[in-house]
């Protein structure tokens, strides 16, 4: 909402003979600053009528109404606005469609998947680990709307991929001697002269068998996961479907109350993948690493998948 346009040129509204007096000039200058501050406050009042535009002081008042203690170090104003908007709009009746609308609002359209395991009374919600700032609010919302016998499991995933490509070069062997004119040891007997590439990486050539075998090799190489640089987890579930590898493991609240870094390690302890994330562990949390192995194609010098 634009700032209220008030005419703050008070000196121009005085009779001409007053404008030349220094005292009136200083009075009008002071009152002009006050009028500009008033215009700012009036605009702020209008913006604070709407959750999308309210300022930090208005957000703080709503947070006190709902008993929310914000953490400004990781929670921006936009997230705090969205959280208040979610609390105000969470009203029955509660349906699966209502939950999907809430996930669209909190996480974003097409940025999550929801699966209901009816025989085991378990609700799984999967979203990128990069979106986990909203995980605590999602857990709060689900806690309010789900039946008491349904268990909610948060499943954040981290996706990193392997890119394979092939280039074939042609070279010609050049013999560096003439009969009776080559000095032993002064140069190589023969060398290779490059004739350029006869197959570029932009032309697909890697077959599915190589991609699948690479995914299987990576699965065998991963031996453990490490949380926050200290918590080691060796109970991994690894599944390779085609050329995509999925590594899954559980993280409990006893192991960490929040996850800020996830790593996959080999048997020797070498770090294979590392990602900085923020995931609050409020209950059952299943971490999932998705590693697709695909052929990379170079388009205008940039790699794509």
Image (cartoon, grey):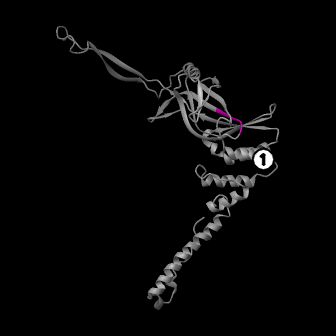
Q: Is residue 303 above or below residue 79?
A: above
In the image: residue 294, left or right of residue 119 = left
Q: Is residue 94 above or below residue 220?
A: below
Q: Residue at x 75, y 44 (%)?
A: 142
* Magenta-span inclusion, residue 111: no
Q: Is residue 236 above or below residue 94?
A: above
Mark 1, residue position: 144
For the C terminus, which image quadrant? Answer: top right
Q: Residue at x 70, y 55 (%)?
A: 85
In the image: residue 210, left or right of residue 200 = right
Residue 299, horizontal then vertical, whole percent:
47, 34
Is residue 55 visible to the viewer in this orientation of the structure? no
In the image: residue 31, left or right of residue 246 = left
Q: Residue at x 67, y 43 (%)?
A: 135
Magenta stretch, overall SS: strand
Q: Is residue 44 above or below residue 182?
A: below
Q: Element under label 1?
A: helix
Is residue 128 visible to the viewer in this orientation of the structure? yes
Q: Hey, which residue is sitting farthest left in the picture? A: 180
Please provide the residue range marked out in magenta. 283-287
Count of numbered badges drawn on the protein: 1
Which residue is at the front of the view, 99 or 252? 252
């Amino acid at each position: 909402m634009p700032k209220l346009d008030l005419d703050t040129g008070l000196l121009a509204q005085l009779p001409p003979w007053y404008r030349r007096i220094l005292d009136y000039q200083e009075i009008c200058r002071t009152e002009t600053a006050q009028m500009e501050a008033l215009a700012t406050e009036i605009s702020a009042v209008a913006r604070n009528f709407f959750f999308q535009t309210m300022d930090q002081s208005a957000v703080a008042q709503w947070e006190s109404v709902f008993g929310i203690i914000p953490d400004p170090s990781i929670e921006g104003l936009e997230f705090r606005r969205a959280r208040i908007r979610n609390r105000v709009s969470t009203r029955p009746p509660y349906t699966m469609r209502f939950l999907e609308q809430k996930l669209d609002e909190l996480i974003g359209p097409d940025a999550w998947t929801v699966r209901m395991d009816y025989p085991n009374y378990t609700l799984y919600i999967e979203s990128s680990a990069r979106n986990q700032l909203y995980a605590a609010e999602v857990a709060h919302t689900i806690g309010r709307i789900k039946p008491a016998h349904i268990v909610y499991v948060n499943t954040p995933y981290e996706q990193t991929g392997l890119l394979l490509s092939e280039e074939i070069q042609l070279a010609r062997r050049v013999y560096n001697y003439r009969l009776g004119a080559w000095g032993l040891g002064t140069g190589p007997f023969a060398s290779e002269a490059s004739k350029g590439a006869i197959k570029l990486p932009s032309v697909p050539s890697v077959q599915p068998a190589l991609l699948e075998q690479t995914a299987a090799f990576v699965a065998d190489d991963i031996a453990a996961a490490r949380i926050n640089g200290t918590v080691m987890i060796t109970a991994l579930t690894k599944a390779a479907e085609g050329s995509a590898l999925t590594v899954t493991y559980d993280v409990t609240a006893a192991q960490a109350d929040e996850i800020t870094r996830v790593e996959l390690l080999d048997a020797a302890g070498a770090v294979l993948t590392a990602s900085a994330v923020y995931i609050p562990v409020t209950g059952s949390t299943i971490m999932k690493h998705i590693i697709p192995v695909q052929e990379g194609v170079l388009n205008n010098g940039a790699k794509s998948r």
